[in-house]
Amino acid sequence: MINKLKIFFVILIFLFSSGLKASEKKTPFIDTNWNFKGIFGKFDRGELRRGYQVYSEVCSGCHSISQLSYRNLYEKGGPEFSIENVKQIAASFDVLDGPNSDGEMFTRPGRLPDKFVDPYPNIESAIAANGGAYPPDMSVLAKARKDGPAYIYSLLQGYVEPPKGYELDEGVYYNKYMDGNQIKMPNVLFDDLVEYEDGTKATTEQMAKDVSNFLMWAAEPNLEERHKLGFRVILYLIILALLVYFSMNRLWSRIESKK
Amino acid sequence: MSEEKYIPKSKIGQWFDSRLPLLSLMHHLRDYPTPKNLNYWWTFGAILTFCLIAQIITGLVLAMHYVAHADLAFESVEHIMRNVNYGWLIRYFHANGSSMFFLAVYIHIFRALFYGSYKSPREMIWILGMLIYILMMATAFMGYVLPWGQMSFWAATVITNLFSAIPFIGESIVTWLWGGYSVDSPMLTRFYSLHYLLPFLIFALVILHIWALHIPGNNNPVGIDIKQPSKDTVPFSPYIAVKDLYALIIFLIITAGFVFFAPNILSHPDNYIKANPLVTPTHIVPEWYLLPFYAILRAVPSKLGGVIVMFASLFILMFLPWLDTSKVRSAVFKPLSKLFFWVLVIDVVILGYIGANPPEGLYLLIGRVATIYYFLHFILVLPVLGYKEKTIPLPISISDPVLGGQPNISTTRSREDIKEKQHD
């Protein structure tokens, strides 16, 4: 009786689960090696520095990254530019400050603690300048999409000709990794678009990978510290668990032998 | 429980203890006789106590930096992640801690279901536990709203809108909950206030839960009453305390794995997009631990019906001690109950899976079947099994694995018997 019931339930579950297999069809993201993945994962400084270059020369025209401060660029675990270098970067931006003692707002060169300056004064002007679509803030973009870095990496290389007979709306581009395949952002990366300071060849693939790494760091600036601390914490806990386990066995052996 | 009266050794101790018996309480907690055959499923009580305290402490620190305002909440969370010393660690621990808290509470509840820990004389422990569980869900839901991401906002919209299903006064109640005509800052600030308050109510209930536990003492895997306290039990400290500690450390290793190496895997990416009332996410889903109830809510075609059935699915658990008519506690001795226990587990997992998917087609059908089974389990399967099932003979006592024991006196005796016994 019980065995028959068991078999009945197993068959029932099997039938249900096989019915659910019909999953939606989605293009899988392009596979690549991510240095920050894994227990000992760390960012590659070169990738982060080149990624910052791509961001500042290409993306930053439309996309803000307002949670990042200039000082983050030299802090540990990031691109780790020299502090002098970062001061120069910050000073190249005009920061709105004030009001001063006359009650006037004024602009001054950026300083290390300032947040990254937004390309547009407000969201509405960003929408107006980009054909009705808001270029999302990139501070946590790599965490705001499923499999974020791979998504960004693939999307930047996903501009292809639409399939025959595909109706594309006005002012929209076809991208095979975008949900619904329609994206308002045009293809921005072309081979040799930027000239890398470290001499790396700026292929589209390379730039896409560098900027995806940079955005992952921007979203998770403490990732390296997190991995490092996590390894120590878990190691400590495992040793502690072993000590407690052996003490426990010793303690309980008194009870077991009392029988 | 026969315990000799504790008298402190020192004069000061005696003076203090006769006025406020804290020392007696400490003594009781230390020597509390615990069945010696408890397995690791019994360590989750201690783990849960730790979870609650850890959530309160990390939450306390987060509250020092968080700003409860629709325009600033999202940014203040990022401020915690980036600029507060170890803010990322505290926030990730708090966020993943809630998931681990629920994982532990589900194991704790299903352990009680399997071993019949809710049965007489432990009904009060069970009811208090269910109240704690309901408060936990309310607290977790409100906490999920605080970061003010897209899922926060839309989950809050969906859940508060449920109250509009109440006839006549529904709309007014929703306006009252919102403190306005849409989900906005006024609601966020009251959720923040309540999210801070409820954990302390839970804490108070936990004290009652443990108090109620210490009256009859622990149930145990065999499910029979303690026959020879000296042989069947061990003092809580150090035996059970060390075992709980060991289990807690293992639990912490798993928690640390999430916190340090996959801190966002249990949450939805959309919650890293700031709340936008003009853009609805494709699928609005709650956190994983609320998914089964979300599935039940959506299994019913009418809104009001869905709300009623969802709340019924929670409150039916309160009546479990009286719905289960079996004289034997532990499913170890009840082969059919054991089978149906696992069916219930699978049923709840299926409901969770359905809750994560859109309510259409086959998903909806399975969700409905699983919902119906959920209720049938409690109102049909358990009462009937209790009468019909032929149980395996029980051992005489925990220390003697010799068969031939009687069903538990406390589950078979009627109320009159208990009264008589108290008069003795």
Image (spheres, coloured by chain):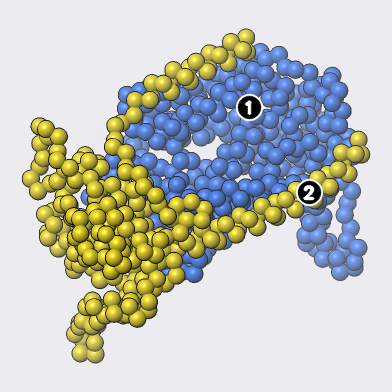
Q: Position of residue B248 (x, y in %)?
A: 66, 49
Colour chain B appears in = blue
Q: For mark 1, what is the residue? A: B322
Mark 1 or 2: in front is 2
Q: Residues within 10 Å of mark 1 (few under 14, many from 20)?
A: some
Q: Which mark is residue B156?
A: none
Q: For mark 2, what is the residue? A: A246
Quote the CA–CA distance across marks 1 and 2.
42 Å
Q: Position of residue B381 (x, y in %)?
A: 58, 19
Q: Secondary structure at mark 1?
A: helix
Which quadrant: the C terminus of chain B? top right
Q: Residues within 10 Å of mark 2 (few under 14, many from 20)?
A: few
Position of residue B328 in the picture relative to residue A153 (left or right): right
Task: Give the residue at x 12% y 59%.
Answer: A128
Task: Give the residue at x 87% y 46%.
Answer: B3
- Amino acid under label 2? Phe
- What chain does mark 2 sit on? A
Confirm whether circles 1 and 2 share one chain: no
Position of residue B419 in the picture relative to residue A96 (left or right): right
Task: Give the residue at x 33% y 32%.
Answer: B358
Q: Position of residue A106 (x, y in %)?
A: 20, 83
- Amino acid under label 1? Trp
Disc 1 and disc 2 in contact, CB within 8 angstroms: no
Position of residue B26 in the picture relative to residue B61 (left or right): right
The answer to which quarter of the image holds residue B234 is: top right
Q: Position of residue A49 (x, y in %)?
A: 33, 66
